[in-house]
Image (cartoon, rainbow, N blue to C red):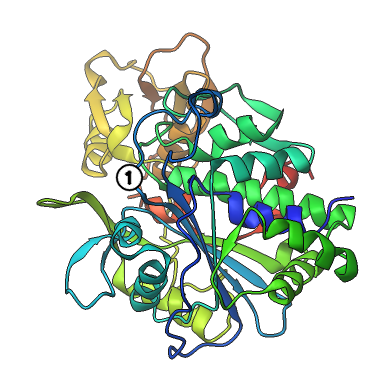
Amino acid sequence: MLRLATALTLLTTLVSGAAWAGPPAPADRSAPGSGTNVLVVGIDSRAGLSKADKERLHVGGAGCNCTDVMMLVHLSQDARRASIVSIPRDSYVEYADGSGVLGKINGAYARGRGPLTVRTVEKATGLRIDHYLETGFTGFERAVNGLGGAALCTDKPLKDENSGLDLTPGMHHADGNGALRYVRARHVDRPGDLGRVRRQQRAVSDLLTRLTVEGALADPLTAAETARTLLLSVRTDTGTDLADLVRLGTAFGRLRPERTEFATVPIKAFDHRVPGVGSTLLWDEERSRALWAALAADRPVTGDRRIQPVPETPAPTNPAGIKVRVDDGAVAAALLAGGFVVTDTSAAAPKARPAGPPVIRYAPGRESDAATLAAALPGARRQVVPGHDAYLDVAVGARAVTVKPVTYDRNAVEGAPVTADRLGCLAATR
């Protein structure tokens, strides 16, 4: 029967990494806070992996001996709610070693291993970290295989040669190797971490839901036995013992999906260039401060408009990447001013406009872009046209057209706080 070991391995192995560097010493616990905070990291290192393992797991190349993924897991004081926040690896922060040096948060591990990683996260967030867990590539693979595989879902093809990911649209059942490729992929959709961490969150959400349904975390006695096995493959800090793991595991086993939240730190700049450091991510000061304040006060993060303000007219994709042909000059000019890439085809417009609202014609697979354009043209009808080219065509009808400005916010699209019942594949099939 699946027990605590597999459940906690789920939480602690949905990250990439390899060789252990040894458990860190306890961090400074002086920061205020309520509830329990667990920092989960995976180390980007190939040390200890054979050539066959590297080929099998599709993890060739040199590692950076840095943290590749971070998840901050907050369990509320009453153990009735959990918040899991992904911290992108390229976040630009000050290291907590007294040097005054700023760099990517994943570099803290190379400078001072687990202890400095913990202190740097505490410095950046203002939260106390109570427990630290560190794991690697093969641990993730074993966990997923032990759970009988993982459910993966996508509404469009996902392919990434670097990670070996190659998924067609639909639901898929993957083994540990396939799931590892899914959560590691960085070169699908927009390059970078936000899409990847959202996929990681979906995978965690589905596995936690499945474990809860199966009752795999409901038996503390068996949890204690299997937690000992877990400690053979997952490193912890010296302040984390068997009893802590049993408490955490059984608490997660009692949570319903709507009581588990997932979020990503809000980002202000996605390509902040720093000499000698490279491309980094700058946190949105106000939003991230509100996020950490909510966790420090043991409050939910979903529904908090300070963390993720809701724009008046949200767009699922960036207008700057959508090429549009419009057969009306005024509408074309308004859409161009709104950020779309517009070609004015009004010279070829019909002399008599058809009755009704504008019609947006587009190729299959462009549904998200069509939704963005439709948000800017309230009341517009959408029509999928097989074989259509890369443009979205707007045929303006006889009805008066109002063009609304739309707001695209990657934070809201890829990292907004959401509960597990609205996130994963299992939610999509309800």
The crowding category of the residue bearing disc 1, from other C-alpha atoms within 10 Å (few below 14, some 14 to 19, many at least 20), is some
| Above or below, 235 relative to 400 | below
Q: Is residue 407 left or right of residue 156?
A: left
In this view of the protein, which residue sits in the foreground, 343 or 112? 112
Vertical relation: 82 (above or below) 111:
below
Quadrant where the C terminus is found in the figure: top right
Q: In this view, does 100 lie to the left or right of 294?
A: left
Q: In what element is the residue under mark 1?
A: loop
Question: Residue at the location (78% across, 43% down)?
Answer: 147
Q: In which quarter of the image is residue 171?
A: top right
Report the label total: 1
Question: Residue 109 at x, y = what percent?
Answer: 35, 60
Relative image position of residue 401 (x, y in whole percent): 38, 40
* Residue drawn at 54 percent across, 41 percent down: 137
Q: Quarter-wise, where is residue 329 in the image? A: top left
Nearer the observer, 277 or 134: 134
Where is mark 1, residue-wise? 64
Indicate whether 340 appears above or below 117: above
- Amino acid tagged 1: Cys
Q: In this view, does 293 lie to the left or right of 350?
A: right
User: Is 275 situated above or below 289?
Assistant: above
Name the spot of residue 168 as percent of width and height, x first: 60, 21
